[in-house]
Image (cartoon, grey):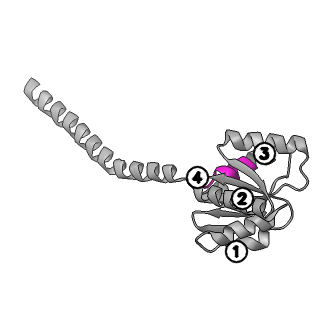
Amino acid sequence: MRKEDKAIIIEKIGETLKEYSCFYLTDTTSMDAEQTSAFRRACFNAEVKMMVVKNTLLHKALEQLEGDYSELYPALTGTTAMLFSNVGNAPAKAIKEFHKKGSELPVLKAAYVEETVYMGADQLDTLSKIKSKNELIAEVVALLQSPAKNVVSALQSSGNKLHGILETLSNK
């Protein structure tokens, strides 16, 4: 591959990395064409972008970005497929769903989610339980609404009790 071609690929990888808030590095070495196609479909359905990259080119692209990605460098061995998403747990859920279909592949090498690095396949469960930004916002809104709903409910039930007492007294 010519040096100019490598520079273009490194730039494209860098642009893709900037476009998404998180990415996963997976090992797809033992996957055949059918498994790879099925996994690509699963990623597409989960709104996860998949890209197979050369480790040296990815290393150079990471070096050119702002931030410290040095913790990820040991994971850049073998065949590397990158999974990109703006939802931190989407790639982990896609991998877990694919594993449920009987395949142990792809194997998670590392993940970069919300400026945190996760290393190793044992982190897959942890990553799948991470809540997305929208889920966290929904929880906060629910927590904020809960006391107000309790006050309104208490006022309404007290009003009904008071109305019932007044009605009973007026009937006597």
Q: Main secondary structure of the magenta part?
A: helix
Residue matched to label 4: 86
What SS does tag 1 mark? helix
In this picture, is 72 found above or below 133? Answer: below
Q: Alpha-carbon distance for marks 1 and 3?
A: 27 Å
- The quadrant of the image that shows the C terminus is top left
Task: Pick whichever of labels 4 and 3 is earlier in the sequence.
Answer: 4
On the rendered structure, is 64 left or right of 134? Answer: right
Residue 150: % across, % down:
31, 46
In this picture, is 94 found above or below 1? Answer: above
Tags 1 and 2 touching, CB below 8 Å? no
Task: Pick whichever of labels 4 and 1 is earlier in the sequence.
Answer: 1
Q: Alpha-carbon distance for marks 4 and 1?
A: 21 Å
- Disc 1 crowd rating (10 Å Cα; few below 14, some 14-19, many 20+) is few
What SS does tag 4 mark? loop
Residue matched to label 3: 98
Q: Is 92 one of the magenta-colored residues?
A: yes
On the rendered structure, is 172 left or right of 79? Answer: left
Q: Residue at x 73, y 58 (%)?
A: 9
On the rendered structure, is 163 left or right of 126? Answer: left
Along the line of sight, the residue nearer the viewer: 54 or 123: 54
Task: Pick whichever of labels 1 and 2 is earlier in the sequence.
Answer: 2
Residue matched to label 2: 8
